[in-house]
Image (cartoon, rainbow, N blue to C red):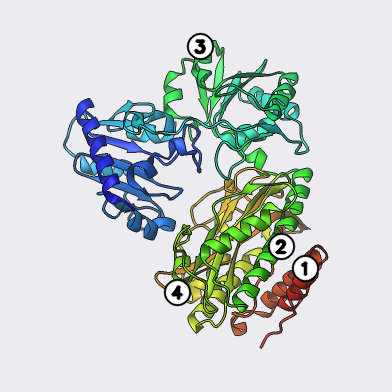
Amino acid sequence: MDSNKYSARIESLRQLMRDNGWDAVILTGSDPHSSEYPAERWQQVKWLTGFTGEAGDVVVTMDHAGLWTDTRYFIQAVQQLEGSGAVLHKTRVTGQVLIPEWLDLHFKGKDDVRIAVDGLCQNVSAIDELEKNFTVVDVPDLLSCLWTERPEIPQTPIFAIDPGESRLQKIEWLRSFLEEKSCDCILLTSLDEIAWMLNVRASDIEYNPLVISYLLVSREDVKWFVQKGQIEDSETEAAFSELRSDGVYILPYNDISLYFNDIEGRLYIDESTLNYHLYSLLGCDTLAGTSPVVFRKSIKNPTEIKGMKEAHILDGTAMEKFLFWLEKSLDADKVITEWDAAVKLGQLRSELSGYQGDSFETISAYGKGAALPHYITPHDNAPVLRQEGLYLCDSGGQFTSGTTDITRTIPLGECSELEKEDYTLVLKGHIDLAMAIFPEGTAGCQIDALARNPLWKAKRNFGHGTGHGVGYFLGVHEGPQDIRQNFNRQSLTPGMITSDEPGIYREGLHGVRHENLLLCVDKGQSEFGHWYGFENLTLCHFDTSAILWELLDQDEIDWLNDYNRHVYNTLAPMLPPEVAEWLKAKTLLSNRK
């Protein structure tokens, strides 16, 4: 990486600060819609510093440049920031100093501190915190004068889907919400919410079937601000025709603020996703709160659940073919790199019905590379896989029937005792969470320890969350539910889909993560209340060759045997005979030793 390029860019930003009298600049890793995965146009942190992680914010002052990111990216950030002049500030750790507090300390005693932000890429909540002590200067597209080859706003073909509930039904439900809140309209800016509301998909953001747009729903009409240029493809025209027949007005993306003066009455907004620049242009009465769409779309309807199960069966066939290919290739002494493996898996998924692309960039990591939870597999000079140690593959697909996300850690040959211990303890935690039964009203933070307890007993841990929500042919990460140590009070509810992915990471040695997607289901009533649990969606066997059986309890062994048997029985009829035979051997029942 050309670190001098990034240090020069930071210095050019400082010159812009001098020219405008700014004391600091804050840039986020998001976009005007608070997206986790922004399109290239809004990857400002990457352009400025070289850091490619999904979560990171940058502060530049005249004498300091810092990147704030969490435990998933610490090793990666140190490597990528080297020579840029920017330093790492750690978040989600004990003693963390977040950006507002750091700015307070840095500018202590200085009056009228002016902090410039790209208001399009900062949500209202974040700016509220800054405005307590500083003068905030809103500069939309702040970097455009420096970023001379900045990409345009993407516009890809749009198509309609049928997820079992029509957009008219959803709009009627949303209008009922407005009536409950005594509001006249609602502004939706989060892209997954808009795609869910209108039953549309596109590819404006890599790995995410989303349409960059805004949606304004009133009690009388629906305005969709989506056009970024001339529409020439028939698929989009067909979708627009269907939307117009349902009363949706199709308008230019950048015209959103022009319609603010037409808003009559009270507007409902979500300050956690609405960008500050648009908020500053509003001239009407507003009511701030959490968007109702977030919770509603997290509860999958029967059609969506059926589709997600179909997607996971398809995905399971690709995974088993991949693992068969990997083992046989190494047995034949073929040279296989991390990149070769990632490409092969992508190729196998691309052959599946309804495949629309990967749901995120595949993490294909061997040995010490797997110690980085969000390792970036190099295209060139990628490490070669050998018949020893552990290989971690975290991947997923977008299908018209649903979204998948799976991690398997695969023993490629002889493993050390430490590798076997870590492999087994992480699997033990994964199984314990998957077997959980819990009372109605239980939040993910209340059962997170189930996945960590086997590791904690051995004084081991991992820094990321245990589980995240997953959308239906939408984002691979969605809320409002999660399973992590943060105190999120959102209860797990039947119909929600959440990952189960404990791990362990030893810098310079290896990493282990086991991940399935779980559907929250009803487990019945007792005299003590209503009970929920999980149903596994993911279908791909767990390799038992690295397990230390004495570390597993009998109920965990029974779960593992039942799961592997279910994988074989479900997938074998869909696999080539040689793969089915191989899988049969891989899923033979194991007894406690």
The residue at which mark 1 appears reads as 566
The residue beneath circle 3 is 261
Between 248 and 453, which is closer to the camera in this rendering? 248
- Mark with earlier residue (2, 1): 2
- Please report whichever mark, 2 or 4, sits nearer to the chain's N-terminal start: 4
Instruction: First in sequence, mark 3 or 2: give its number.
Output: 3
Q: Earlier in the sequence, mark 1 or mark 4?
A: 4
Name which residue type carries label 1: His
What amino acid is labelled 2 in the image?
A: Leu
Q: Does the CB distance between marks 3 and 2 fall below 8 Å? A: no
**Front of the two marks 3 and 1:** 1
- Secondary structure, mark 4, is loop
| 325 relative position to 504: left or right | right
Which comes before the other along the chain, label 4 or label 3?
A: 3
Depth-wise, is mark 3 or mark 2 nearer the camera? 2
Q: Secondary structure at mark 1?
A: helix
Badge 3 density bin: few <14, some 14–19, many ≥20, Cα 10 Å: few
